Amino acid sequence: MSNQLTDLLHIKHPVIMAPMFLVSNTKMVIEAMNAGIAGCIPALNYRTLEELRAAARELKAAKPEGGSFGFNLIVNKSNVKYKGQLEVLCEEGCDFIITSLGSPEETIKQAHKVGIKVFCDVVDLKFAKKVEGLNADAVIAVNNQAGGHRGGASPEDLIKELSSKCNIPVISAGGVGRKEDIDKMLSYGAVGVSVGSPFIASTEASVTEEYKQACVDYGADDIVVTERISGTPCTVINTPYVQKIGTKATWIENLLNKNRKLKKWVKMIRFSIGMKATEKAAKKATYKTVWVAGPSIEHTTEILPTKAIIARLVS
């Protein structure tokens, strides 16, 4: 499965284990590297900069020849730790950074100074061309099958448009739960895929057994889009609690979002509240179950070690 992404990251298979808030950890990424794919962790999974620094050092020490690891940075104002996280990653080193939810300009400048590649989440051609102009190394094309914050276009439409009109590699995110899905994304023009939801139900994932089992018990038809977590459309499992609270923003949130002066503060507050609710559901059993996942859990039939999930995806 050698191609442009495998050459770019020095990996065996054109697959990145996607960064997942609260789910991803160093154990999973080490297993990913040993199995021939790349792994990525959200910097926000670490409460302090020293914990982030320790994770980077652990991954460097465990990195096999041909391995590749990275971190995800939220680069907008909702992440008050952003500048410190970027500084730590540039000091400690990693193979790549994936940027989300904001302008990656500063990240690209600082990361490239120390030889770190930067891939940028995009949902359309407009933003893909913008980050290409900022010298991003690749775009992560987030389609309407992605888990968490998703795009609006189908995998086929988004990949074909970006790959035909961009001069940097296109990595597809969303809709991959098995080998044939990877083949499909590559046939559209992607150089590789970013895969998240199938790894929630891994033995190494940092979430409750209830969350993992939910990814086994529920399927694609049970995924809904909610505005109640971060203020941005996000996919979650349609649990009874999600049904109870609804998936639309409240009238007061909609009203405040129309105010130019207050809008960014409303988003920051909603983001903070939503992340805390998600963390509670992921870390302990509770009736307030807000479990983030994508439709690719359709192909998750049991909780397995990370390396077994990778074997299913690439063989």
Image (spheres, rainbow, N blue to C red):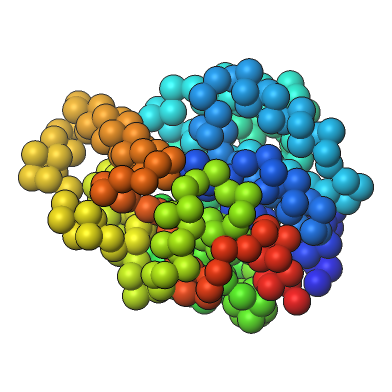
Q: In this rendering, would 143 be left or right of 63?
A: left
Residue drawn at x 55%, y 69% is: 302
Q: Is residue 56 above or below residue 96?
A: above
Residue 54 appearing in the image: yes
Residue drawn at x 43%, y 54% is: 211
Residue, far right: 65
Residue 22 position in % (x across, y down): 50, 41
User: 315 or 193: nearer the eye?
Assistant: 315
Q: In this rendering, would 192 be left or right of 216?
A: right
Residue drawn at x 16%, y 51% is: 245
Q: Quadrant of the N terminus?
A: bottom right
Residue drawn at x 53%, y 56% is: 200
Residue 120 position in % (x across, y down): 57, 47
Residue 76 position in % (x across, y down): 43, 32
Residue 73 position in % (x across, y down): 55, 36
Residue 122 appearing in the image: no
User: 246 or 72: nearer the eye?
Assistant: 246
Q: Quadrant of the C terminus?
A: bottom right
Q: Is residue 237 above or below residue 129?
A: below
Q: Is residue 59 above or below residue 294?
A: above
User: 221 or 185: nearer the eye?
Assistant: 221
Q: Quadrant of residue 250?
A: top left
Q: Quadrant of residue 114?
A: top right
